[in-house]
Image: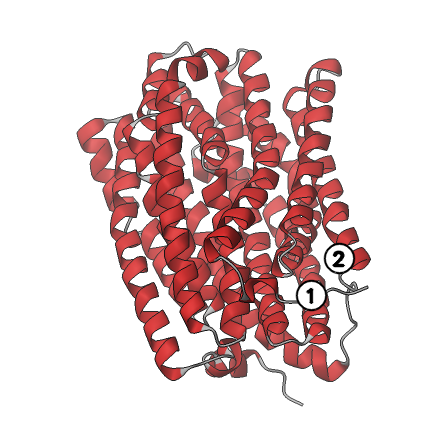
């Protein structure tokens, strides 16, 4: 039986934020921990070029994953708003539309990337054997993007219903599958990077199934839209998905520049950055999850016109970020030496980069968290392009010049220092702008943002009859 109640319209907002974030982070970290274990296994193989290859590949995979993240943001926002309006049919219909377009466009996007893997890896700075390893790894994983998109959108639908536990379990299932297959394929069958890639593909398949099955079992599944409904849902979906995808693309673009900047210091530096790239989502998985977790809370209350609860949810989310980052920084500082030993780090440059991250730079992740919360607010309050412009600004103007001068002043460490410093500035801008959006929304008492505040964008994408 479908359960279409909007559960975030009442009750403690701090509790909603905490429960949604922690449960979502468990699911995310199930995947991130496996990625971390992948890197540990690969480090044990004793070849820097393999670890560096994963670093280069990670930047490209982040780029492809951004498409799925953008589609899931749109699906989650529209389903949550429909539930806040009390329209269960509209919620199920929008979910179907999001899944259809997500799979179709995801497959096309994956094909474009797959045919240009060598070129993209070269742009990252990979060369020689490292380039070959990167392309081999990516050629196996990239075609599975449509399944990752299904898993992400399915989880977003579950979170829109407030079902954090089942959304969490979808990624947990994927993590378990990956964790079981990793040692078998990497060591048991001596497949090295290819084995890690195959395990990731299997994890994406299982995640997709685990996310969609509960939607049918507990929330009425998907309602097939009529031609008229399909036409009306598509511009609403695209009005959020298009800027959200553009927003997400900014991050891998910035990461690509950072990776290329680090590449000039050699494979040991790239390997260090790759290890940090695996540590970051494990350490701050709760913050990563907060962006998706706070969206349904804001979306449901926005859909019902409870603007005071929208503002309170934003405030509680920022305070939640502050507490989590401070606590995790203390943990990372305490575990620096064990982390060095775990990854069998021998090179001093790799060691120095890890020490820098597991120290003062960890505190800078608070500002990334503020950006995540602000972006979720923009996407659910009818201003998705604010997220787009701010994210692109943060990963271009807030990254390139700061990393450039950071390298001049501090060498390889300056890459990380410059990247962190640029985030402080754009987090402050995002915070102020989010407060302004909530003030305007409350003053006008707008309750259907995607249709009233995005009318020009929707008209652009609307089909002509």
- Give the Cα separation between the discs numbered 2 and 1: 10 Å
Mark sitting on residue 127: none
Q: Pointer 2: what residue? A: 215
Q: Position of residue 296 (x, y in %)?
A: 55, 61
Q: Residue at x 63, y 44 (%)?
A: 114
Q: Nearer the viewer, residue 100 or 382?
A: 382
**Residue 72 visible in the picture:** yes
Q: Residues within 10 Å of mark 2 (few under 14, many from 20)?
A: many
Mark whose residue sits in front, 2 or 1: 2
Q: Residue at x 48, y 54 (%)?
A: 248
Q: Pointer 1: what residue? A: 95
In this rendering, position of residue 56 left or right of residue 150 = left
**Residue 261 visible in the picture:** no
Q: Position of residue 421 (x, y in %)?
A: 25, 42
Q: Is residue 254 above or below residue 217?
A: above
Q: Is residue 157 above or below residue 137?
A: below
Q: Secondary structure at mark 2?
A: helix
Q: Is residue 208 above or below residue 280?
A: below
Disc 2 + disc 1, Cβ < 8 Å = yes
Q: Residue at x 42, y 70 (%)?
A: 383
Q: Residue at x 50, y 32 (%)?
A: 282
Specify the quadrant that holds the N terminus: bottom right
Quarter of the image where one finds residue 273: top left
In this rendering, position of residue 342 left or right of residue 330 = right
User: Outermost residue, left direction?
Assistant: 409
Q: Position of residue 16 (x, y in %)?
A: 52, 54
Quarter of the image where one finds residue 406: top left
Q: Secondary structure at mark 1?
A: helix
């Amino acid at each position: 039986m479908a359960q279409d109640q909007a559960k975030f319209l009442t009750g403690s907002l701090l509790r909603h934020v905490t429960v949604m974030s922690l449960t979502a982070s468990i699911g995310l970290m199930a995947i991130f921990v496996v990625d971390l274990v992948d890197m540990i296994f690969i480090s044990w193989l004793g070849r820097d070029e393999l670890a560096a290859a994963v670093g280069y590949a990670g930047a490209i995979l982040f780029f492809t994953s951004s498409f799925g993240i953008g589609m899931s943001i749109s699906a989650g926002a529209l389903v949550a708003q429909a539930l806040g309006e009390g329209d269960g049919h509209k919620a199920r219909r929008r979910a179907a539309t999001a899944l259809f377009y997500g799979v179709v466009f995801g497959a096309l996007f994956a094909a474009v990337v797959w045919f240009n893997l060598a070129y993209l890896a070269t742009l990252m700075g990979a060369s020689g054997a490292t380039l070959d390893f990167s392309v081999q790894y990516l050629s196996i994983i990239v075609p599975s993007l449509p399944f990752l998109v299904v898993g992400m959108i399915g989880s977003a639908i579950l979170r829109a219903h407030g079902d954090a536990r089942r959304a969490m379990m979808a990624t947990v299932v994927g993590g378990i599958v990956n964790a079981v297959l990793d040692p078998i394929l990497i060591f048991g069958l001596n497949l090295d990077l290819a084995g890690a890639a195959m395990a990731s593909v299997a994890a994406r398949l299982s995640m997709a199934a685990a996310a969609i099955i509960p939607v049918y079992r507990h929330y009425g599944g998907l309602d097939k839209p009529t031609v008229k409904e399909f036409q009306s849902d598509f511009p609403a979906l695209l009005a959020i998905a298009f800027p959200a995808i553009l927003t997400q693309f900014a991050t891998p673009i910035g990461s690509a520049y950072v990776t290329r900047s680090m590449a000039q210091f050699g494979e040991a530096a790239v390997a260090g950055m790759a290890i940090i790239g695996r540590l970051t989502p494990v350490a701050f998985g709760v913050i990563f999850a907060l962006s998706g977790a706070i969206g349904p809370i804001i979306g449901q209350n926005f859909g019902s016109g409870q603007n005071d609860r929208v503002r309170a949810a934003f405030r509680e989310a920022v305070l939640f970020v502050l507490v989590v980052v401070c606590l995790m920084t203390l943990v990372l500082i305490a575990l620096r030496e064990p982390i060095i030993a775990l990854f069998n780090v021998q090179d001093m440059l790799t060691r120095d980069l890890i020490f820098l991250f597991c120290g003062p730079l960890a505190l800078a992740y608070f500002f990334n968290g503020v950006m995540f919360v602000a972006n979720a607010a923009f996407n659910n309050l009818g201003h998705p392009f604010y997220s787009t412009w701010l994210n692109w600004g943060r990963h271009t103007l807030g990254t390139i010049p700061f990393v450039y001068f950071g390298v001049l002043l501090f060498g390889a460490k300056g890459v990380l220092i410059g990247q962190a410093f640029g985030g402080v500035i754009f987090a402050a801008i995002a915070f102020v702008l989010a407060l302004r959006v909530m003030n305007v929304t409350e003053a006008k008492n707008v309750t259907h943002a995607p249709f009233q505040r995005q009318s020009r964008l929707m008209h652009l994408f609307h089909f002509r009859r």
